[in-house]
Image (tube, rainbow, N blue to C red):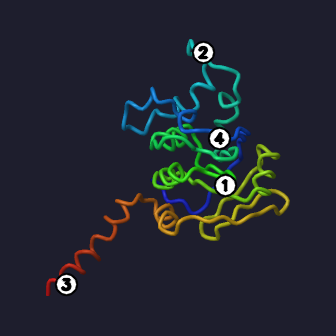
Amino acid sequence: MNPITELRATTFVLHQDNIDTDQIIPARFLTTTERTGLGRAAFYDWRFDASGAATTHPLNGEAKSHAILIAGHNFGCGSSREHAPWALLDFGFRAVISSEIADIFRSNALKNGLLAIVVGAEEHAYLIANPGIELRIDLETMQITGPNDWHTGFALDAFARRCLMMGVDQLGYLLAQDAAIAAFERNRAA
């Protein structure tokens, strides 16, 4: 995972509410624990017909040039599957912004380096109504800025934020503390 302190990218909007994890990555693609290659399965049933031919869904075109997904209300609901954030990351998204993100999906996303950000209803409506704008997400100031001085704050779990900024997952964070842990154990043993 690369450290994330700031992300500048354009937005891609999916207006649909209640996009569940089976829509993000259908269950038939959960046969691997490899993260790479899952982008091809992201939103598969929207992007391809029953014969496997590409549809005209916008995810097959312009979405690849955008790194921030603006999703409808209640994104990532449904079953818990770590493959969902893996698929979005491999597809090219680095952040998802919505007015509500399912707790388990959000936790999985943040643990895997995908920014999952909840904003207020008014700010969400603005982002939905203005697809393709450039945003700057700053983890240090916890602010999102856009065109014409548009901005909003957001909140993240402090530990998740620290891990994202360090570019590590939870285990990586603990391993980075190895020297301090060893020193503590030596002192405690004495």
In the picture of the structure, the residue carrying the numbered disc 1 is: 8
The crowding category of the residue bearing disc 3, from other C-alpha atoms within 10 Å (few below 14, some 14 to 19, many at least 20), is: few
In the picture of the structure, the residue carrying the numbered disc 4 is: 18
Q: CA distance from mark 1 to mark 3?
A: 46 Å
Mark whose residue sits in front, 4 or 2: 4
Name the kind of residue labelled 3 in the image: Arg
Say whether residue 22 is left or right of residue 28: right
Q: Which of disc 1 and disc 4 is earlier in sequence?
A: 1
The crowding category of the residue bearing disc 2, from other C-alpha atoms within 10 Å (few below 14, some 14 to 19, many at least 20), is: few
* Camera-side residue of 173 and 73: 73
From the top left corner, tell me how far across and down residue 35 is, in percent: 42, 39
Name the kind of residue labelled 2 in the image: Ala
Under tag 3, what secondary structure? Answer: helix
From the top left corner, tell me how far across and down residue 154 is, in percent: 66, 64
Say whether residue 28 is left or right of residue 101: left
Q: CA distance from mark 4 to mark 1?
A: 26 Å
Quarter of the image for residue 148 reads: bottom right
Name which residue lies at 28% across and 70% down.
178
Q: Is residue 72 above or below residue 4?
A: above
Residue 53 is marked as 2
The crowding category of the residue bearing disc 4, from other C-alpha atoms within 10 Å (few below 14, some 14 to 19, many at least 20), is: some
From the top left corner, tell me how far across and down residue 110 is, in percent: 51, 55
